[in-house]
Amino acid sequence: MDLHTLPCVFAQTYLELVSELGWSRRDVLRQAGLTARQVNAASGMGLEAYRRLLLAVRDAALRAGSGTAVGIEMGWRLPPTAFGPLGMALLSSATLGDALALTEKYWPLYGMGLTFLVRQERDLCVLEFAALPFVPPDVRDIVLESVMASIYRSTVALAGVNALRGQVWFDFPEPPHAAGARRRLGDVRYGMPATQWRVSSAGLDQPLPMANAVSLRQAIAQCELELTQRLHTRAGLVSEVSRLLALGVNRPGFCGGQLL
Protein backbone atom coordinates (compact mmCIF):
# COMPACT_ATOMS: atom_id res chain seq x y z
CA MET A 1 0.00 0.00 0.00
CA ASP A 2 1.53 3.33 -1.04
CA LEU A 3 1.35 6.63 0.81
CA HIS A 4 -1.71 7.83 -1.07
CA THR A 5 -3.72 4.62 -0.87
CA LEU A 6 -6.57 4.15 1.58
CA PRO A 7 -7.48 0.86 3.27
CA CYS A 8 -10.33 -0.96 1.57
CA VAL A 9 -12.49 -0.72 4.72
CA PHE A 10 -13.33 2.89 3.82
CA ALA A 11 -14.61 2.24 0.30
CA GLN A 12 -16.44 -0.90 1.43
CA THR A 13 -18.18 1.01 4.21
CA TYR A 14 -19.42 3.63 1.75
CA LEU A 15 -20.98 0.89 -0.36
CA GLU A 16 -22.56 -0.67 2.73
CA LEU A 17 -24.08 2.73 3.48
CA VAL A 18 -25.44 2.89 -0.08
CA SER A 19 -27.14 -0.48 0.40
CA GLU A 20 -28.55 0.42 3.82
CA LEU A 21 -30.16 3.54 2.39
CA GLY A 22 -31.75 1.58 -0.43
CA TRP A 23 -29.75 3.14 -3.24
CA SER A 24 -28.24 1.23 -6.13
CA ARG A 25 -24.66 0.07 -5.54
CA ARG A 26 -24.40 -0.70 -9.24
CA ASP A 27 -25.37 2.84 -10.22
CA VAL A 28 -22.94 4.35 -7.72
CA LEU A 29 -20.08 2.19 -8.99
CA ARG A 30 -20.97 2.96 -12.60
CA GLN A 31 -20.98 6.70 -11.95
CA ALA A 32 -17.63 6.43 -10.14
CA GLY A 33 -16.15 4.37 -12.96
CA LEU A 34 -15.24 1.57 -10.55
CA THR A 35 -15.80 -2.16 -10.23
CA ALA A 36 -16.61 -4.21 -7.15
CA ARG A 37 -13.18 -5.82 -7.49
CA GLN A 38 -11.48 -2.43 -7.17
CA VAL A 39 -13.51 -1.57 -4.07
CA ASN A 40 -12.64 -4.89 -2.43
CA ALA A 41 -8.95 -4.96 -3.37
CA ALA A 42 -6.78 -5.91 -0.41
CA SER A 43 -4.20 -3.38 -1.58
CA GLY A 44 -6.64 -0.53 -0.95
CA MET A 45 -7.85 2.26 -3.20
CA GLY A 46 -5.99 5.24 -4.65
CA LEU A 47 -7.08 8.76 -3.83
CA GLU A 48 -8.53 9.60 -7.24
CA ALA A 49 -10.68 6.46 -7.31
CA TYR A 50 -11.75 7.13 -3.73
CA ARG A 51 -12.66 10.69 -4.66
CA ARG A 52 -14.88 9.47 -7.50
CA LEU A 53 -16.62 7.05 -5.14
CA LEU A 54 -17.32 9.76 -2.54
CA LEU A 55 -18.75 12.08 -5.17
CA ALA A 56 -20.95 9.31 -6.57
CA VAL A 57 -22.34 8.52 -3.12
CA ARG A 58 -22.91 12.21 -2.44
CA ASP A 59 -24.74 12.59 -5.75
CA ALA A 60 -26.91 9.57 -4.92
CA ALA A 61 -27.94 11.29 -1.70
CA LEU A 62 -28.78 14.48 -3.59
CA ARG A 63 -30.86 12.59 -6.16
CA ALA A 64 -32.73 10.81 -3.37
CA GLY A 65 -33.46 14.14 -1.68
CA SER A 66 -32.88 12.42 1.63
CA GLY A 67 -30.80 15.10 3.30
CA THR A 68 -28.43 12.33 4.40
CA ALA A 69 -25.15 13.55 5.90
CA VAL A 70 -23.06 11.15 3.84
CA GLY A 71 -19.74 11.83 5.59
CA ILE A 72 -21.28 11.66 9.06
CA GLU A 73 -23.14 8.43 8.35
CA MET A 74 -20.01 6.90 6.83
CA GLY A 75 -17.91 7.72 9.90
CA TRP A 76 -20.65 6.46 12.21
CA ARG A 77 -20.15 3.02 10.70
CA LEU A 78 -16.43 2.98 11.58
CA PRO A 79 -16.11 2.14 15.31
CA PRO A 80 -12.81 0.81 16.76
CA THR A 81 -13.47 -2.68 15.42
CA ALA A 82 -13.01 -1.33 11.86
CA PHE A 83 -9.36 -0.45 12.45
CA GLY A 84 -7.52 -3.73 12.87
CA PRO A 85 -4.72 -3.76 15.47
CA LEU A 86 -5.23 -0.08 16.27
CA GLY A 87 -8.86 -0.76 17.11
CA MET A 88 -7.83 -3.64 19.37
CA ALA A 89 -5.31 -1.38 21.10
CA LEU A 90 -8.02 1.21 21.75
CA LEU A 91 -10.45 -1.36 23.12
CA SER A 92 -7.72 -2.77 25.39
CA SER A 93 -6.51 0.59 26.74
CA ALA A 94 -6.68 1.34 30.46
CA THR A 95 -8.16 4.84 30.14
CA LEU A 96 -9.72 7.10 27.54
CA GLY A 97 -6.64 9.33 27.66
CA ASP A 98 -4.45 6.32 26.85
CA ALA A 99 -6.70 5.43 23.91
CA LEU A 100 -6.49 8.96 22.49
CA ALA A 101 -2.70 8.96 22.85
CA LEU A 102 -2.50 5.69 20.88
CA THR A 103 -4.83 7.09 18.23
CA GLU A 104 -2.54 10.09 17.77
CA LYS A 105 0.62 7.95 17.68
CA TYR A 106 -0.65 5.45 15.13
CA TRP A 107 -2.80 7.84 13.13
CA PRO A 108 -0.64 7.38 9.98
CA LEU A 109 -1.88 3.79 9.69
CA TYR A 110 -5.46 4.83 8.89
CA GLY A 111 -5.63 8.63 8.77
CA MET A 112 -4.13 9.17 5.32
CA GLY A 113 -4.97 12.62 4.02
CA LEU A 114 -5.62 14.10 7.46
CA THR A 115 -3.57 15.17 10.43
CA PHE A 116 -4.73 14.49 13.99
CA LEU A 117 -3.52 16.32 17.08
CA VAL A 118 -4.57 16.04 20.73
CA ARG A 119 -3.74 18.97 22.99
CA GLN A 120 -4.88 20.65 26.20
CA GLU A 121 -6.42 24.12 26.44
CA ARG A 122 -6.97 24.91 30.12
CA ASP A 123 -9.63 22.41 31.20
CA LEU A 124 -10.38 21.27 27.66
CA CYS A 125 -9.08 18.39 25.60
CA VAL A 126 -8.97 19.49 21.97
CA LEU A 127 -8.92 16.93 19.17
CA GLU A 128 -8.02 18.74 15.96
CA PHE A 129 -8.17 17.49 12.38
CA ALA A 130 -6.81 19.12 9.24
CA ALA A 131 -6.82 18.01 5.61
CA LEU A 132 -3.48 17.74 3.86
CA PRO A 133 -2.99 19.66 0.58
CA PHE A 134 -3.37 16.61 -1.65
CA VAL A 135 -6.95 15.95 -0.46
CA PRO A 136 -9.24 17.05 -3.34
CA PRO A 137 -11.22 20.18 -2.37
CA ASP A 138 -14.53 18.75 -3.62
CA VAL A 139 -14.46 15.92 -1.06
CA ARG A 140 -12.60 17.66 1.77
CA ASP A 141 -15.72 18.38 3.83
CA ILE A 142 -17.01 14.81 3.49
CA VAL A 143 -13.66 13.42 4.63
CA LEU A 144 -13.56 15.72 7.68
CA GLU A 145 -17.14 14.82 8.59
CA SER A 146 -16.45 11.10 8.35
CA VAL A 147 -13.34 11.15 10.52
CA MET A 148 -15.05 13.31 13.14
CA ALA A 149 -18.02 10.96 13.29
CA SER A 150 -15.75 7.92 13.53
CA ILE A 151 -13.76 9.38 16.44
CA TYR A 152 -16.96 10.43 18.19
CA ARG A 153 -18.57 7.02 17.70
CA SER A 154 -15.40 5.25 18.80
CA THR A 155 -15.27 7.28 22.01
CA VAL A 156 -18.89 6.47 22.74
CA ALA A 157 -18.14 2.79 22.15
CA LEU A 158 -15.18 2.93 24.54
CA ALA A 159 -16.49 5.04 27.39
CA GLY A 160 -20.23 5.63 27.01
CA VAL A 161 -22.29 8.46 25.60
CA ASN A 162 -21.73 10.78 28.57
CA ALA A 163 -17.95 10.42 28.78
CA LEU A 164 -16.89 13.45 26.76
CA ARG A 165 -19.64 15.90 26.01
CA GLY A 166 -18.53 19.04 24.23
CA GLN A 167 -18.59 20.99 20.99
CA VAL A 168 -17.84 19.73 17.50
CA TRP A 169 -16.37 22.42 15.23
CA PHE A 170 -16.16 22.34 11.44
CA ASP A 171 -14.17 24.93 9.52
CA PHE A 172 -16.59 25.04 6.56
CA PRO A 173 -20.03 26.64 6.10
CA GLU A 174 -23.15 24.95 7.43
CA PRO A 175 -24.36 22.37 4.89
CA PRO A 176 -27.97 21.43 4.06
CA HIS A 177 -27.58 18.20 6.06
CA ALA A 178 -26.53 19.96 9.29
CA ALA A 179 -29.55 18.56 11.15
CA GLY A 180 -28.28 15.03 10.47
CA ALA A 181 -24.84 15.95 11.77
CA ARG A 182 -26.32 17.37 14.98
CA ARG A 183 -28.49 14.31 15.45
CA ARG A 184 -25.35 12.17 15.56
CA LEU A 185 -22.80 14.52 17.15
CA GLY A 186 -24.79 16.88 19.38
CA ASP A 187 -23.51 20.46 19.62
CA VAL A 188 -22.11 21.02 16.11
CA ARG A 189 -20.91 24.46 14.99
CA TYR A 190 -19.92 25.47 11.47
CA GLY A 191 -17.75 28.24 10.07
CA MET A 192 -15.29 27.85 12.94
CA PRO A 193 -11.53 28.57 12.83
CA ALA A 194 -10.62 24.87 12.76
CA THR A 195 -12.15 21.39 12.70
CA GLN A 196 -12.06 20.23 16.30
CA TRP A 197 -13.84 18.26 18.98
CA ARG A 198 -13.54 20.29 22.19
CA VAL A 199 -14.42 18.41 25.36
CA SER A 200 -13.76 18.52 29.08
CA SER A 201 -10.52 16.87 30.17
CA ALA A 202 -12.24 15.48 33.27
CA GLY A 203 -13.20 12.20 31.60
CA LEU A 204 -9.76 11.31 30.25
CA ASP A 205 -8.81 9.26 33.32
CA GLN A 206 -11.98 7.22 33.19
CA PRO A 207 -11.14 3.47 33.27
CA LEU A 208 -12.29 1.56 30.22
CA PRO A 209 -14.37 -1.59 30.72
CA MET A 210 -12.47 -3.82 28.27
CA ALA A 211 -8.93 -2.93 29.38
CA ASN A 212 -6.52 -5.85 29.00
CA ALA A 213 -2.76 -5.48 29.32
CA VAL A 214 -1.90 -8.62 27.34
CA SER A 215 -4.05 -7.83 24.32
CA LEU A 216 -2.86 -4.22 24.48
CA ARG A 217 0.79 -5.28 24.20
CA GLN A 218 0.01 -7.59 21.30
CA ALA A 219 -1.97 -4.92 19.46
CA ILE A 220 0.74 -2.28 19.97
CA ALA A 221 3.37 -4.69 18.66
CA GLN A 222 1.33 -5.16 15.47
CA CYS A 223 0.80 -1.39 15.12
CA GLU A 224 4.55 -0.86 15.48
CA LEU A 225 5.25 -3.42 12.77
CA GLU A 226 2.79 -1.80 10.36
CA LEU A 227 4.10 1.68 11.15
CA THR A 228 7.68 0.56 10.53
CA GLN A 229 6.67 -0.90 7.17
CA ARG A 230 4.99 2.37 6.22
CA LEU A 231 8.04 4.40 7.23
CA HIS A 232 10.24 2.12 5.13
CA THR A 233 7.93 2.70 2.17
CA ARG A 234 8.19 6.44 2.68
CA ALA A 235 11.98 6.30 2.96
CA GLY A 236 12.17 4.27 -0.22
CA LEU A 237 10.00 6.77 -2.06
CA VAL A 238 12.15 9.70 -0.92
CA SER A 239 15.28 7.83 -1.98
CA GLU A 240 13.88 7.09 -5.44
CA VAL A 241 12.80 10.70 -6.00
CA SER A 242 16.24 11.91 -4.94
CA ARG A 243 17.87 9.43 -7.33
CA LEU A 244 15.72 10.56 -10.25
CA LEU A 245 16.38 14.21 -9.51
CA ALA A 246 20.12 13.57 -9.36
CA LEU A 247 20.02 11.73 -12.68
CA GLY A 248 17.91 14.37 -14.34
CA VAL A 249 19.78 17.53 -13.43
CA ASN A 250 21.64 17.64 -16.77
CA ARG A 251 19.47 15.23 -18.66
CA PRO A 252 17.49 16.33 -21.77
CA GLY A 253 13.76 15.92 -21.42
CA PHE A 254 13.78 16.05 -17.61
CA CYS A 255 12.54 19.20 -15.90
CA GLY A 256 11.47 19.85 -12.33
CA GLY A 257 11.34 16.15 -11.47
CA GLN A 258 9.06 15.30 -14.43
CA LEU A 259 9.83 13.62 -17.72
CA LEU A 260 8.79 15.81 -20.63
Image (tube, rainbow, N blue to C red):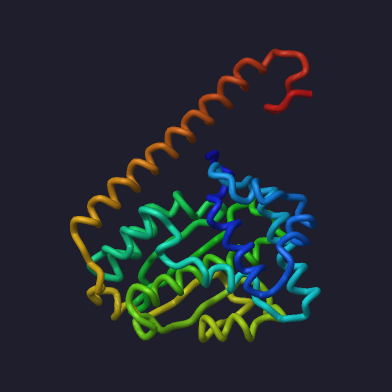
240 or 75: nearer the eye? 75
Left or right of 211 on screen, residue 250: right
In the displayed structure image, the side of residue 227 where residue 73 appears, left or right: right
On screen, residue 189 above or below 18: below
Which residue appears at 77% of the width and 67% of the height? 59
Q: In this picture, is 249 found above or below 21?
A: above
Image quadrant in which you'd find residue 32: bottom right
- The one of 83 and 51 positioned closer to us in this rendering: 83
Residue in the image at 62% along x and 79% along y: 190
Number of marks: 0
> Looking at the image, which residue is at 34% across and 41% down?
225
Quadrant assignment, res 140: bottom right
Q: Is residue 200 left or right of residue 140?
A: left
Q: Give the image location of residue 220, x and y in percent.
A: 29, 51
Query: Which residue is most to the left?
Result: 213
Occupied quadrant, residue 127: bottom left
Where residue 136 sits: x, y (%)?
Answer: 69, 54
From the viewer's perspective, is 183 left or right of 166? right
Residue 9's x, y, as percent?
Answer: 53, 56
* Quadrant the C terminus occupies: top right
Residue 208: horizontal and vertical position, in percent?
25, 73
For residue 16, above or below residue 187: above
